């Protein structure tokens, strides 16, 4: 593990500052890793588009700034990958859908602009479930992503590409989006760190929206500190995002650094009663229980807390999300951008629209649009969408009450480890059940982090543990996440990594 | 809760402007019923006294100063268009045969 790609983003930034490496060397090393691992029958397929030329130009400019003593940011020159849901000017952006194949945005999303303004070379765009709908990355119109730990397994979703890229050392940093767990669950499946920040604390301008009241961009990394560095870089109020919260979250990096010292005395952590039971596989629970003991050993006060409305979270989510997405995706009408399929004869605009949407959307997208259309229809609105919105209120109240007695909540991130590619492809409900633990945070807008908790004693695949904090208290996630990460890493004698990728490039 | 019939799914697809063929209807209709059955459990959970939430973090209307800022050029705005003409989006006819 001596090559540059195996260093964390923080280590790469330090090496750049010390003049031990150039950004061009870092970018080239990651491009080499992508070239060696992305394509072909055994390839990860984590990148949909690689911008080798652009990344090297940006790296050269970064090195020139460094040479003049004028870096734009501590991470200036450290390469990054961006989930294909975020608009990147001049780089194809498809959201994993055929309906946007070949679309090149004429503008940058705010987070893209922040990344460019800080000088991080953009390696390319990562694969994802179509319009971020999925828990396995098998709903991508451009083929599934393979899990670097076992290439016959799914990497989680919807951000399987970003998580796999980070796990397989194709990039030290990646941007993800989390609407119901799409950053955190792939983090758990690939042994990486994923953070869903507080709703509205990172701009969504330029994100191809799935469900506006739930969507949140956030960091995918290999360490808690790297996630904090990235969240501080991309966070802050944006006048272009009307649901952006005022101000900017500070102290995340500091929380990660102080947390790594390992003192959690006085920190109250509540195990969620409703996120335990038969749905949770024994190997996941085994690692979870072990992590809880480690937290206790660091001084944390562990109790159990009940959030009774969580049992309805999945049902409420799978009504609210389809309702919002059926409305959002109406803009794909084959008129101004995207796929246009023109049937024979002299079709009307509406006929072109119908045929184009049928050809351009995959099955899961169609299912959710249809469910959303149903839930919003007159006569069903109150029973479905209206009721789901009320459940949302109850879940927010549960969180408020729980956070009166504890500082953070904890659960396993996902019920199982990564399953086999194809195993649940045509069983939407089985995929939905993967999001049991992650969905409540999106419904309530609270921040969450997934940190590796080890590997399963049954199949050797990674497991994750999730912490949730009150709105705008993201720093707590970094403090506790870093403390647990440091203690577990010491216990394991190093971070857990997919061995076949840890060896390459040495 | 009642099951969605194949005709009802076809109607929803019509409302959503998606041209589903017979094979797709056969495939999707039963899956939609499985999903609806799973989410139906929320009916009656929350009473009339519970206020619905549409947005996790309450906000009032957000306004900005009325200042002119640069926007996309016509070429940029049209760069992704399936068809364009004279700096405008070119679309199929919008009226039906009978109109």
Image (tube, rainbow, N blue to C red):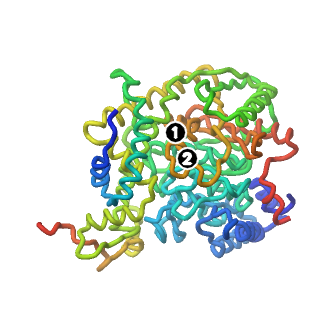
**Residue drawn at point x = 30 percent, y = 79 percent:** B85
Dot 2: within a 10 Å radius of its alpha carbon, few (fewer than 14), some, or many (20 or more) residues? Answer: many
Instruction: Please provide percent x and percent y for residue A226.
Output: 72, 50
**Quadrant location of the C terminus of chain A in the rendered image:** bottom right
User: Measured along the vertical axis of the image, is residue A144 above or below residue A367?
Assistant: below
User: Measured along the vertical axis of the image, is residue A304 above or below residue A468?
Assistant: above
Question: Between marks 2 and 1, how big is the CA–CA gap?
Answer: 8 Å
Q: Is residue B74 left or right of residue A472?
A: left
**Residue drawn at point x = 77 percent, y = 36 percent:** A483
Q: Is residue B56 left or right of residue A326?
A: right
Q: Which image quadrant is residue A74 in?
A: bottom right
Dot 1: within a 10 Å radius of its alpha carbon, few (fewer than 14), some, or many (20 or more) residues? Answer: many
Count of numbered circles in the view? 2
Of mark 2 and mark 1, the one earlier in the sequence is 2
Chain of the residue under label 1: A
Disc 2 to disc 1: CB gap under 8 Å: yes
Q: Which residue is mark 2?
A: A178
Question: Could you confirm whether marks 2 and 1 are on the same chain?
Answer: yes
Residue A23, visible in the rendered structure: no
Instruction: Please provide percent x and percent y for residue A24.
Output: 74, 71
Secondary structure under the numbered disc 1 in the rendered image: helix
Secondary structure under the numbered disc 2 in the rendered image: loop
Which residue is nearer to you in this view: A402 or A502? Answer: A502
- Mark seen at residue A155: none
**Residue drawn at point x = 28 percent, y = 49 percent:** B7
Q: Which residue is mark 1?
A: A442
**Residue drawn at point x = 30 percent, y = 57 percent:** B17
Chain of the residue under label 2: A
Q: Which image quadrant is residue A332 in?
A: bottom left
């Amino acid at each position: 593990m001596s090559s540059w790609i195996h260093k964390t983003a923080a280590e790469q930034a330090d090496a750049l500052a010390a003049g031990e490496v150039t950004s061009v060397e870092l970018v080239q090393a990651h491009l080499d890793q992508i070239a060696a691992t992305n394509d072909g029958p055994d390839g990860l397929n984590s990148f949909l588009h690689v911008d080798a030329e652009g990344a090297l130009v940006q790296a050269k400019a970064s090195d020139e700034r460094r040479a003049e003593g004028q870096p734009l940011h501590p991470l200036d020159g450290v390469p990054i990958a961006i989930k294909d849901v975020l608009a990147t000017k001049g780089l194809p952006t498809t959201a994993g859908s055929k309906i946007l194949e070949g679309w090149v945005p004429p503008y940058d999303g705010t987070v893209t602009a922040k990344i460019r303004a800080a000088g991080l070379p953009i390696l390319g765009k990562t694969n994802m479930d179509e319009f971020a709908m999925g828990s396995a990355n098998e709903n991508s119109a451009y083929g599934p992503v393979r899990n670097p730990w076992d290439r016959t397994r799914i990497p989680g979703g919807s951000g399987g590409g970003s998580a796999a890229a980070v796990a397989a050392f194709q990039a030290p940093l990646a941007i993800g989006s989390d609407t119901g767990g799409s950053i955190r669950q792939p983090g758990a499946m690939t042994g990486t760190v994923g953070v869903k920040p507080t709703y509205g604390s990172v701009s969504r301008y330029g994100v191809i929206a799935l469900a506006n009241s739930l969507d949140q961009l956030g960091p995918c990394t290999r360490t808690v500190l790297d996630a904090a560095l990235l969240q501080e870089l991309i966070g802050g109020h944006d006048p272009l995002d009307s649901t952006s919260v005022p101000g900017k979250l500070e102290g995340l990096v500091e929380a990660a650094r102080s947390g790594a010292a390992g003192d959690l005395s006085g920190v109250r952590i509540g195990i969620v009663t409703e996120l335990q039971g038969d749905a949770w596989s024994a190997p996941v629970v085994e690692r979870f229980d072990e992590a809880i003991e480690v937290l206790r050993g660091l001084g944390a006060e562990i109790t159990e807390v009940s959030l009774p409305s969580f049992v309805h979270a999945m049902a409420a989510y799978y009504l609210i999300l389809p309702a919002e997405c059926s409305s959002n995706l109406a803009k794909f009408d084959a008129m101004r951008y995207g796929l246009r399929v023109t049937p024979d004869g002299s079709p009307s605009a509406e006929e072109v629209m119908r045929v184009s949407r049928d050809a351009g959307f995959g099955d899961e997208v169609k299912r959710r649009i249809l469910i959303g259309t149903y839930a919003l229809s007159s006569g069903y609105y109150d029973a479905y969408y209206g009721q789901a919105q009320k459940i949302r209120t109850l879940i927010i109240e549960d969180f408020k009450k729980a956070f009166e007695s504890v500082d953070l909540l904890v659960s396993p991130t996902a019920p199982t480890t990564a399953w086999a590619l194809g195993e649940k492809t045509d069983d939407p409900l089985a995929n939905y059940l993967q999001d049991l633990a992650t969905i409540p945070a999106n419904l309530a807008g609270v921040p969450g982090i997934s940190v590796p908790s080890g590997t399963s004693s049954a199949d050797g695949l990674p497991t994750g543990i999730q912490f949730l904090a009150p709105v705008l208290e993201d720093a707590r996630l970094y403090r506790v996440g870093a403390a647990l990460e440091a203690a577990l890493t010491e216990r394991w004698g190093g971070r857990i990594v997919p061995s076949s990728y840890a060896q390459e490039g040495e | 809760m009642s099951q969605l019939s194949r005709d009802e799914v076809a109607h929803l697809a019509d409302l959503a402007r998606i041209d589903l063929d017979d094979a797709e209807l056969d495939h999707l209709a039963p899956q939609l019923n499985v999903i609806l059955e799973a989410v139906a459990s929320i009916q009656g959970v929350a009473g009339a006294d519970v206020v619905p939430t549409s947005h996790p973090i309450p906000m009032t209307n957000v306004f900005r100063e009325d200042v002119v800022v640069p926007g996309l050029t016509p070429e940029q705005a049209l760069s992704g268009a399936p068809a364009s003409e004279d700096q405008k989006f070119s679309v199929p006819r919008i009226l039906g045969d009978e109109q």
